[in-house]
Amino acid sequence: MTLRLGRLPAVYAAKFRAEIALQVAYRGALVIWLLGLLIEPIVYLVVWTTVARGQGGQVGGFAAGDFAAYFTILMIVNQLTFTWHFHFFEWRVRNGFFSPMLLRPVHPIHNDVAENLTFKMLTFTVVGPVALFLLATFGATLHPEPWHLIAFVPTLVLAMVLRFLLEWTLALAAFWITRTVALNQAYYVAVLFLSGQVAPLSLFPPAVQAVASVLPFRWMVAFPVETVLGRLAPGEVLAGFGAQLGWIIVSLVLMRVIWRAGIRRYSAVGA
Amino acid sequence: MRSLGLIWLSLRLGVLNALQYRADFFIQLFQSLVGLGTALAAVALVFGQTDELGGWSRDELIALVGVFLLVGGLINVVIRPSMERLMEGVRLGTLDFTLTKPADAQLLVSVRQVEVWRLIDVALGTVVIVIGIARLGERVGPERAVAFGLVLVAGVAIIYSFLLILSTLAFWLVRLENILVIFGSMYEAGRWPVGLYPPWLRVALTLVVPVAFAITVPVETLVGRLEPMTLVTTVGLALAFLVGSRWFWKFGLRHYTGASA
Amino acid sequence: MTLSATRPSIRVTDLRKTYQVPEREGGLRAAAGSILRRTSRSVPAVAGISFEVEPGEIVGFLGPNGAGKTTTLKMLSGLLYPTSGEATALGHVPWRREPDFLRRMTLIMGQRNQLAWDIPVVDSFELNRAIYGVPRDEYAERLKELVELLELGDLVRKPVRNLSLGERMKCEVAGSLLHRPEVLFLDEPTIGLDVTMQRRIRAFIAEYNARTGATTLLTSHYMADVEALCRRVIVIHHGVLLYDGDLAGLVERFSPRKTISIDLEAGQKPPDAGWLAELAGGPDAVVQHSAERLTLRVLRSETAAVTTRLLATLSVRDLVVEEPPIDEVIDLVFAAGPGSDVESERAGATR
């Protein structure tokens, strides 16, 4: 895959143009995927605000308004970090769409990056207003200090990079396993719980919280949310950056190794 | 009756087809157990912080998880796979074959495909329901059991009609291959009692997507919360949905243009 | 069951079908604009077709891709509602899809499967039997007959996924005929098959028609299908009926010239170009004029006279008079369009 880095911006520009046209044509399907992304945080928002109100105002350091803020921000962060390649890589390989990608002088990952970013750009136009609506309707309490907002941006970007790299690498399992559906589900469940989508991680038993901090999932979704909501001390945020960067490096290394092994196997087995 | 014979034959064919893939049994078993574990873990998490959720106790929630799995299993055995097959048939033009047969097309497309191992969900769901009810110490007499059966059938009928309507939309919106994903997302909301949701969300879930009737109402019946009016409304809604979806299906056939000229 | 010999099996009157096709230009701006506004244009796939088919006829619909022949077939089999016009088949309006009509007809489409993929073919046949309500003994008899005619042998016990493309098609055909339909609609039945299999399928269709007297309509863009099977040809192009009659008549009408090829005896001096052109009917009529060979395109009515003159004037080693290849004729027909015998003549002459 020899491509001079200088050509990459031009490639991406062209890719974006094509993707926007394509996804706009399929905007109906996009709305449907989006609905799936939105439902979950909303459901848990309702559940936990009910719990908080039922318990006399607050639970585990979260009042109803805090939960509303948490899950709404979570919805945004989830939408911005979300990838789907884990589910469709197998389909792509099985139906012969992967070979043409290999024949192009650009690493296939760039195609997926462009596709992914375009989806997020387009769907954010809906997610943004929905988030505002939720914040208002559910009476979210949101009082970030300036440094929270400033710190939020890099945590979000790193989270996006980390989640994409890790999930794309895991998707490469399709080279070895033909029915990845069980693996997908196991991963999905891990992400669901350990990235704070079912409940803020601070509500979990301490043992689980320790595990969650060691695994990458918290750093993909929960960490930016916790940062912007001001639930972390500056030291913890810095430590979090470290964890994110560490996991990104691990993912990059994993990706290179698995990709090389995968391609060798793919070429041996045949398209 | 001939239609019953056709249903039986078609299902038998589908089961034969599905049994070819024995590995699927283990995959489904794994998935069902993980799904069950996830649902119960979420309930445990919530009830680690509280004793009641919107008036529902932990054991009632466990029964709800059971009904969620049961209804999900029932839908996923025949109805959802057949609707997916229908949409594929529209895309590939194989629906043409079904339409030229002298049998009711809606019948043929609705029992086309069977994912027999989804019955594991039905079994698991039933077990969980029994456990939940036992823990509650509720006595489910014959009256309640009949009401439960009725409401369950009505709920499944409503969901079937809804999925049929969604799939019929494929006649016009051929590009919406993932239209059934809408249903999947909405169904997720049925994990929790529908009374939890604010009225506007409840309306969306109750009227537009009748998840509530399929899941919450059967649970209410089992635990003795059911109001007679709800029973009547549910059955009435089921009939209305069945009639409405059939009308829409026939309407769609009129406008069906086939895969390519 | 006997059909009325006096009533046509299929009658079509001014049938039309117009599709609304959304259209959009390429580029980002158009893509953004299309979110709000959708422009579409009307495409007339079938623009007023009328014909009648007698019971037992085999009729071939010929036309290039997009001509409207498959759309016509789909309307006659009840799959599509026409935009306007009328049609009856076996006394029924096809798109009402009355069970009685559906039981007496069948649709076979090339390259499309209705048999279940993973289970033995005979299991799918059983389902069809139930759907069409064929009594068991009749079913057994017909199955035997079809297996014999199509040389299926043991294939019916195998799952469809284990069959080759040709074997699959044979099974599809068998499965579609278990209920002894009186009308067969075949849409490109031999497409994608190898030459041997194409011939087998054609032979089978002819045999089935001979045995059962089933009215057969088939669409194809393979000339070979039509030549082998159809005494009557309907040419459709741009949704309009260009020709309805037998194949010989088609050639005659659209290609009014025959080709005369002469090999000259060694030593025979080739005739003067001007004389040859005058004899043949114009300089365009002389296709080849070399030392050994002359090829002329001559009007049918003149063929005999020109041949006699040539034989009388030249020493000829060999002389052949040929119809133009049918494919060429069809090309002419398609290139020309509606109501254009004269134009096709002109077009043929300039070749």
Image (tube, grey):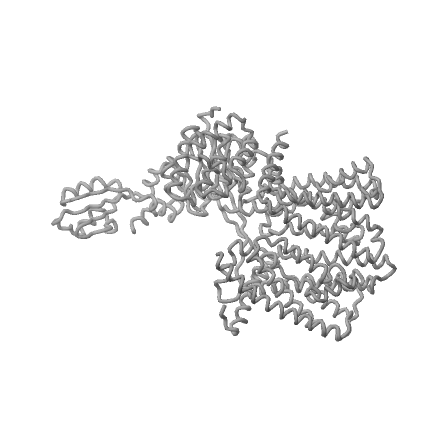
- Give the camera-side residue of B34 and B243: B34
Describe residue A268's horizontal placement relative to residue C274 as left or right: right
Q: Is residue B164 visible?
A: no
Numbered circles on residues, count: 0
- Name of the residue lying farthest toward the left: C267
Corner quadrant of residue A151? bottom right
In percent of width and height, residue B11 lies at 61, 37
Q: Residue at x 83, y 65 (%)?
A: A61
The residue nearer to you, when weighing C190 against B129, is B129
Name the side, left or right, on which A84 lies relative to C155: right
In the foreground, A133 or C195: C195
Residue A92's place in the image compared with C98, above or below, is below
- Quarter of the figure with residue A138: bottom right
Q: Position of residue B124 (x, y in %)?
A: 72, 45
Q: Can see residue C149?
A: yes
List x then y, in percent, for residue A51: 83, 57
The residue sitting at the top extreme is C2
Image: C171 above or below A124 = above
Residue C127 position by quadrant: top right
Q: Residue furthest right?
A: A56
Q: Give how far across and how far down residue B236 sits, in percent.
A: 75, 39
Closer-to-camera residue (C14/C33): C33
